[in-house]
Image (cartoon, helix red, strand yellow):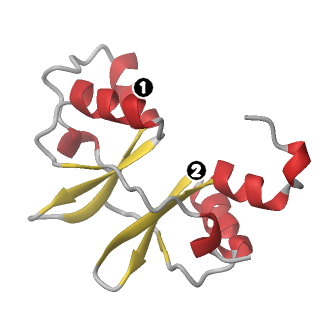
């Protein structure tokens, strides 16, 4: 099975000036654990729930801290044609749970560990 079969094609994007609270609200409303940060200066990055949690754990103000200040820019991107095994291997090596899927120049999806597990387990084993 391929990444294109597992990925979510609805990608939450935020700008680097969004506050962490704004980003968290959007992520919560869309029920996603990561957002793509599009920055004209630094390119494509990712902001995850872990990034927000780490900021809160350092007692930083989520109304003052910006997505751009907490974005990971050293992103490993997946291609839609990767196998799920390739995606899972990249996640394991990098120690992360989300991959931005690129096709051409822009993001076309996001694949998470949960997406991969859902594809690998029989349908009757997955409880939502």
Expressed as whole percent of the image width and height from the top left, the position of residue 126 reads 82, 43
- The residue where tag 1 is placed is 53
> Mark 1 Cα within 10 Å, few/some/many (few <14, many 20+)?
some
User: Image height check: is 86 above or below 120?
Assistant: below
Q: Is residue 33 left or right of residue 117?
A: left
User: Image height check: is 45 above or below 31?
Assistant: below
Q: Earlier in the sequence, mark 2 or mark 1?
A: 1
**Regarding mark 2 in the picture, which secondary structure is present there?**
loop
- In the rendered image, the residue lying farthest to the front is 124
- Residue at 16% from the left image edge and 64% from the top image edge: 42
Q: Is residue 95 left or right of residue 125?
A: left
- Residue at 64% from the left image edge and 63% from the top image edge: 93
- The residue where tag 2 is placed is 97
Specify the label residue 123 is tagged with. Answer: none
* Quarter of the figure with residue 34: top left
Looking at the rendering, in which quadrant would you find the N terminus?
bottom right
- Residue at 47% from the left image edge and 35% from the top image edge: 31
Q: Is residue 98 left or right of residue 100?
A: right
Expressed as whole percent of the image width and height from the top left, the position of residue 38 reads 20, 59
Q: Is residue 73 left or right of residue 126?
A: left
Expressed as whole percent of the image width and height from the top left, the position of residue 114 reads 67, 48
* Quarter of the figure with residue 5: bottom right
**Regarding mark 1 in the picture, which secondary structure is present there?**
helix
- Report the number of numbered marks: 2
User: Image height check: is 92 above or below 128?
Assistant: below
Looking at the rendering, in which quadrant would you find the C terminus?
top right
Q: CA distance from mark 2 to mark 1?
A: 15 Å
- Residue at 70% from the left image edge and 71% from the top image edge: 84
């Amino acid at each position: 099975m391929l990444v294109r079969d597992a990925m979510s094609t609805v990608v939450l994007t935020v700008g680097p000036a969004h506050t962490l609270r704004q980003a968290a609200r959007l992520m919560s409303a869309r029920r996603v654990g990561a957002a793509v940060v599009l920055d004209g200066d630094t390119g494509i990055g990712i902001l995850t729930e872990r990034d927000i949690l780490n900021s809160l754990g350092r007692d930083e103000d989520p109304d003052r801290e910006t997505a751009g200040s907490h974005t990971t820019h050293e992103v490993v991107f997946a291609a839609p044609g990767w196998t799920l095994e390739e995606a899972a291997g990249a996640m394991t090596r990098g120690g992360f749970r989300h991959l931005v899927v690129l096709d051409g120049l822009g993001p076309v999806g996001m694949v998470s560990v949960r997406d991969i597990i859902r594809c690998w387990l029989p349908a009757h084993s997955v409880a939502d």
